[in-house]
Image (cartoon, helix red, strand yellow):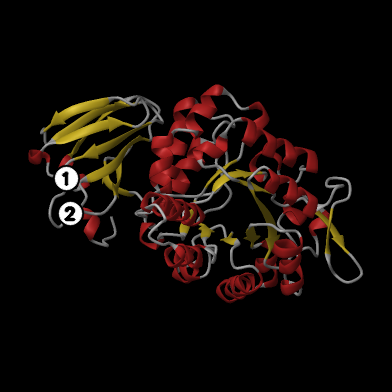
């Protein structure tokens, strides 16, 4: 949710300025505030504990990841959240208040969020819409039994978001499903309670599939798939599940393709494809690897600022699959506007072998005859103005080529129609 201080602050600056205030200082102040608003409403970037640790988390692990994020200067690339998933629970006290696990988190959850905030980072935390958490069953972490929100909405949300001071909340659905709850009703009432208690908190609905159009009015982001794995087949499956959901993404509201598996066992090309498509489709970017032992190769991938810029753009248009040649696909998203003439194009090779992919400029909404220039967002190569009606590139097996093309839009181009491509 957007910090409600942003608009009043802008109005105050405008009202309080006088003829002696340098114009450039006022513009700079407003620009900084706009940057903050964009950051709050852009897809979340950060790190989350589940992929690498599941319930085997601790205060020491979380602090080490926050320390590593700062040491690696990942904030400069946009990563700012440290999210604690299932596994921190320690039961409830006599009044029903949630407690932290005393062995895993001896300092408590409030002190941990303060530690994260001191590093100029945001802190995220987990709960379930029902009575029990997912790990209470799937990971046999029985301490998660009775730790869900159900029956404790106001009490738990006040504790998590105000008393413990967390900035992001992931709400899982295992407990809700086991109770047979109506997901739209349940997630809507949780969202309303969050806005009442702490409206600046980001809210993620974790239903393991696209919940329905209703969720776009309820949450900041919503999972569209089951849990991701560090297999390329899982990456492709999630891409396919999200292909038709582009119309539901908007500024501040995003299809969540799950936490990143970059740096967790796939090949270099597979990791690049994974990261590229999450950026192209404007999914939240939550690192899922161990930041304390990150490789230079992985660091290079996750800090590609050209790709991250596609993800963080305030002009939200989730990439669409515009050409399907079986193993070879062309995905594209307009930049700036649907008529700007600037388009990001991802050439995806689902097969194991390198293949050449040819596509027409008209298929991505551009008028080739008017001329265009190219930039490869991975190699950083720029190419002079051309007017060829088709582009051909070799794409590595399980790989991707991402191009930024600047030219002239076709009138009534493909990006202006809400068709089902």
Q: Residue at image x 64%, y 59%? A: 169
Q: Residue at image x 88%, y 46%? A: 103
- Return the x and y of residue 373 as percentages of the image width and height: 19, 33
Q: Secondary structure at mark 1?
A: loop
> Would you name the residue on which mark 2 appears?
413
Q: Is residue 400 left or right of residue 85?
A: left
Front one among 142 and 372: 372
Q: Are marks 1 and 2 in contact (CB under 8 Å)?
A: yes
Label 2 packing within 10 angstroms: few (<14), some (14-19), many (20+): some
Q: Residue at image x 73%, y 51%? A: 113
Residue 366: which disc? 1
Front one among 37 and 281: 37
Q: Is residue 379 left or right of residue 418?
A: right
Q: Secondary structure at mark 2?
A: loop
- Which residue is at the far right? 94
Label 1 packing within 10 angstroms: few (<14), some (14-19), many (20+): many
């Amino acid at each position: 949710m957007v910090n409600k201080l942003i608009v009043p602050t802008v109005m105050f600056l405008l009202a309080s300025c006088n003829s002696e205030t340098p114009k450039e200082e006022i513009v700079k102040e407003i620009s900084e505030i706009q940057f903050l608003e964009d950051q709050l409403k852009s897809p979340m970037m950060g790190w989350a504990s589940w992929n690498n640790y599941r319930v085997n988390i601790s205060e020491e692990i979380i602090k080490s990841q926050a320390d590593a994020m700062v040491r690696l200067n990942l904030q400069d690339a946009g990563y700012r959240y440290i999210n604690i998933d299932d596994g921190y629970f320690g039961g409830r006290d006599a009044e029903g208040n949630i407690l932290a696990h005393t062995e895993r988190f001896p300092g408590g959850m409030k002190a941990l969020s303060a530690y994260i905030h001191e590093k100029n980072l945001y802190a995220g935390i987990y709960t379930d819409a029902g009575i029990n958490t997912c790990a209470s069953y799937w990971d046999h972490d029985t301490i998660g039994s009775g730790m869900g929100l159900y029956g404790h909405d106001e009490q738990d949300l006040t504790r998590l978001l105000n008393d413990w001071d967390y900035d992001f909340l992931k709400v899982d659905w295992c407990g809700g499903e086991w109770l047979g709850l109506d997901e739209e009703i349940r997630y809507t009432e949780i969202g309303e309670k969050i806005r009442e208690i702490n409206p600046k908190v980001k809210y993620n609905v974790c239903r393991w599939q696209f919940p329905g159009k209703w969720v776009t009015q309820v949450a900041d982001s919503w999972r569209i798939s089951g849990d991701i794995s560090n297999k390329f087949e899982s990456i492709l499956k999630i891409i396919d599940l999200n292909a038709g959901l582009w119309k539901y993404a908007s500024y501040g509201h995003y299809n969540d393709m799950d936490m990143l598996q970059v740096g967790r066992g796939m090949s270099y090309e597979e990791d690049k494809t994974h990261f590229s498509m999450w950026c192209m489709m404007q999914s939240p970017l939550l690192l899922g690897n161990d930041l304390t032992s990150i490789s230079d190769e992985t660091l290079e991938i996750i800090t590609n600022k050209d790709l991250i810029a596609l993800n963080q753009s305030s002009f939200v248009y989730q990439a669409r699959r515009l050409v399907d040649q079986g193993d070879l696909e062309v995905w594209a998203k307009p930049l700036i506007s649907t008529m700007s003439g600037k388009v990001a194009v991802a050439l995806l090779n689902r097969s194991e072998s390198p293949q050449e992919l040819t596509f027409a400029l008209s298929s991505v909404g551009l008028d080739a005859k008017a001329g265009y220039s190219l930039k490869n967002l991975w190699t950083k190569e720029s190419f002079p103005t051309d007017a060829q009606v088709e582009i051909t590139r070799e794409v590595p097996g399980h790989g991707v080529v991402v191009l930024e093309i600047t030219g002239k839009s076709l009138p009534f181009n493909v990006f202006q129609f809400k068709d089902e491509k």
